Image (cartoon, rainbow, N blue to C red):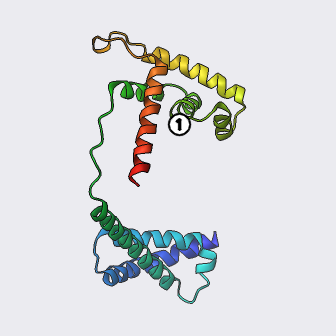
Amino acid sequence: MGAERDFDEFYLGTVRRVTAQIVALLGDASSEAEDAVQEAYARAWQRWDTVSKTDDPAAWVRVVAYRIKVSAWRSAVRRVAAHRRHGPPGDVPEHSPDSVALVAALRQIPEKQRRAIVLYHIVGLTVEQVAAEVGAPTGTVKARLSRGRAALATLLDDPVADGRASLPLTAVLDQRLDKALDKESQRSSHA
């Protein structure tokens, strides 16, 4: 309880002064300067046993807040430079009705089944690789795949949707996988 009380007293006694100093140092009266100061105090609390023993804990907070703000500024400069170098992102193609239906259906099945379905059908892992990633026996993964497919087949079975028969589940999953692989190969060929 003593450390908490010491930190609270330190915070209340220094926060206004340190915030004003950071605003003056950075020439930034926005809430971002205040956010940097609050983050610095949070870090000071995490290391209070060490920070409290420094000659000037407020100076420690001030330096950390300044570095946080400068780091954020540098990140923004890098983003702008990257944007200038590469231009704005290209047009994102609209999702097909089958893709939208698949994602909506995936949201409705249990998480463990959804994870198995996505890793197997969309990512393209083998049953053994899925089992290793999720930390379950292969038999359990096979059962999740089977139950997940059955649930998805029920959720995606809408033969009268926009006047055409719905694609079978495996075709929708295969199309989704093919699109994902095509996009990946296009990205790697442009790199």
Count neighbours of disc 1 (C-alpha within 10 A) and say few if under 14, some if 14 to 19, many if 20 or more. Answer: some
Q: Secondary structure at mark 1?
A: helix
Percent across and percent down for residue 130 are 63, 35
Q: Residue at x 27, y 44 (%)?
A: 91
Type of amino acid at the residue the image marks with label 1: Val
Q: Quadrant of the C terminus?
A: bottom left
Q: Residue furthest bottom?
A: 55
Residue 89 relative to residue 15: left or right: left
Residue 49 relative to residue 70: left or right: right
Residue 46 relative to residue 179: left or right: right
Position above or below: 47 against 150: below
Position above or below: 40 against 170: below
Q: Quadrant of the N terminus?
A: bottom right
Q: Residue at x 41, y 79 (%)?
A: 66
Residue 27: which quarter of the image?
bottom left
Position above or below: 18 against 32: below
Residue 92 relative to residue 191: left or right: left
Depth order, front residue of 184/151:
184
For label 1, the residue is 123
Q: Residue furthest front?
A: 189
Number of numbered callouts drawn = 1
Percent across and percent down for residue 69 are 39, 74
Percent across and percent down for residue 158 are 38, 12
Depth order, front residue of 120/101:
120
Q: Residue at x 46, y 29 (%)?
A: 107
Percent across and percent down for residue 114 are 54, 30
